Image: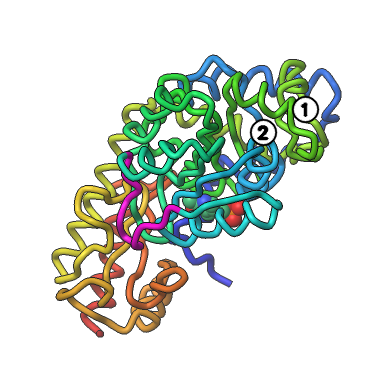
Amino acid sequence: MAHVKLHIPGPVEVSEKTFKAFCRPMIGHRGQGFKDLYAAIQPKLQALLYTKQLVYLSTSSAWGVMEGAIRNLVAKKVLNCMCGAFSDKWFDVSKRCGKDAEALQVPWGSPIRAEAVDQKLATGQFDALTVIHNETSTGVMSPIYEIAALKKKYPDVMFIVDAVSSMTGIKLEFDALGIDVLLAGTQKAFAMPPGLAVFVCSPAALAKAATMKDRGYYFDLVEFQKNAEQSMTPSTPSIGHVFALQSKLEDIFAEGLEARYVRHLKLAQMTRAWAAKHGFNLFPEPGFESVTLTCVSNGARPGGRVVDVPKLQKLVKDQGFLIDGGYGKIKGTTFRISNMGDETEATMNQLYAALDGAMKQL
Ligand SMILES: *Cc1c(COP(=O)(O)O)cnc(C)c1O
């Protein structure tokens, strides 16, 4: 069967070079070979996240670390900032972990604003907070630097930030942000196969975790730190992913971080322009559009063009491209186009040509 190229917001297309690295012969995860591998990529991971902390690798999808952060860091009550399917779900996950949790819900399409977070934290009820930087379901990027600035006012509140679909696509300076946990899965803007999460914790998060009795083992932050100090992971990692990550970091630094951020922004702007050309509105509140994907309104917002989304998807799929038909309660009234990972102006233009062709038949 011919491969259909992925322009859904994760997993995204994986390069031949990355796949080759992924498929290298196995090595032992307690041997010198693995330690050398992890030690070799550690400085690049630190440069990528602008941190002096050790960066951890978890063989899990992002949700593993998202749940683990709750188990490690919430003693009193967590404020879950909710603005779409993934961030809404985090509230549910907090409760399933047996934690006292409160929702800060804003309408889908709106960002989380620092003022609203400030108001909630001012009650003094919370010792942790979750925010999704790039809410993939709505294509909204929340102003994470403004939100993180609140950490100075509330130093005892653990700031847990999901950058699953933005990490590597936009600058996220962990140490300067001053937050406590920053995490991502590799199948989004890293353009790697799913199954690995990359994350970093503050010294304060590690100290807090050490006081938590029921933090479990698999996602124990203290174990991650202890092992990372030896260039190891707590349990057997997906070694293929670590080879793939080594290869991907080579690519990222060959291109240059700044160039990578500029490329992502430019491609997102091209997709927004494609949508405007065809009379569509965008779903996100203006000024908060994601740089890694575009969530196009298809009736979810007043005015603007409305098409048969499954038909649009089928017409572009027949030309070799997969786009997303909308997520959760905005399925069909939106559709999403990803530009994250390895895409270029040339590859995006091929997609727009296919979309243009499809639009003529709608
Ligand atoms: C994809 C995604 C997740 C979930 O990731 P999994 O890999 O399915 O665990 C969480 N948050 C955001 C913002 C995402 O885009």
* Residue named by callout 2: 57
The magenta-colored residue range is 104-114
Q: Nearer the viewer, mark 1 or mark 2?
A: 1
Q: Is residue 74 left or right of residue 106?
A: right
Position of 15 relative to 10 (above/below): above
Residue 18, placed above or below residue 153: below
The quarter of the picture where the N terminus appears is bottom right
User: At which x and y percent is residue 172?
Assistant: 41, 30
Instruction: Report which quarter residue 114 is drawn in.
Output: top left
The residue carrying pointer 2 sits among few (fewer than 14), some (14 to 19) or many (20 or more) residues within 10 Å by Cα, namely: many
Helix, strand or loop for disc 1? helix
Residue 38 in the image: above or below residue 94: above
Q: Is residue 65 left or right of residue 188?
A: right
Q: For the image shown, how many numbered marks are present on the structure?
A: 2
Distance between mark 1 and mark 2 Cα atoms: 12 Å
The structure residue drawn at horizontal position 76% and vertical position 29%, both measured from the top left corner, is 233
Q: Foreground: 352 or 224?
A: 224
Q: Amino acid at mark 1?
A: Glu
Image x and y of residue 296, in percent: 28, 65
Q: Amino acid at mark 2?
A: Leu
User: Is 78 left or right of 226, judged from the image as shown?
Assistant: left
The x, y position of residue 76, in whole percent, is 62, 39
Left or right: where does residue 157 sit relative to residue 214?
left
Q: Residue at x 42, y 68 (%)?
A: 324
Residue 108: give its label. Answer: none
Judge whether residue 245 can be spotted in this image. Answer: yes
Q: Quadrant of residue 71?
A: top right
To which residue does mark 1 refer? 223
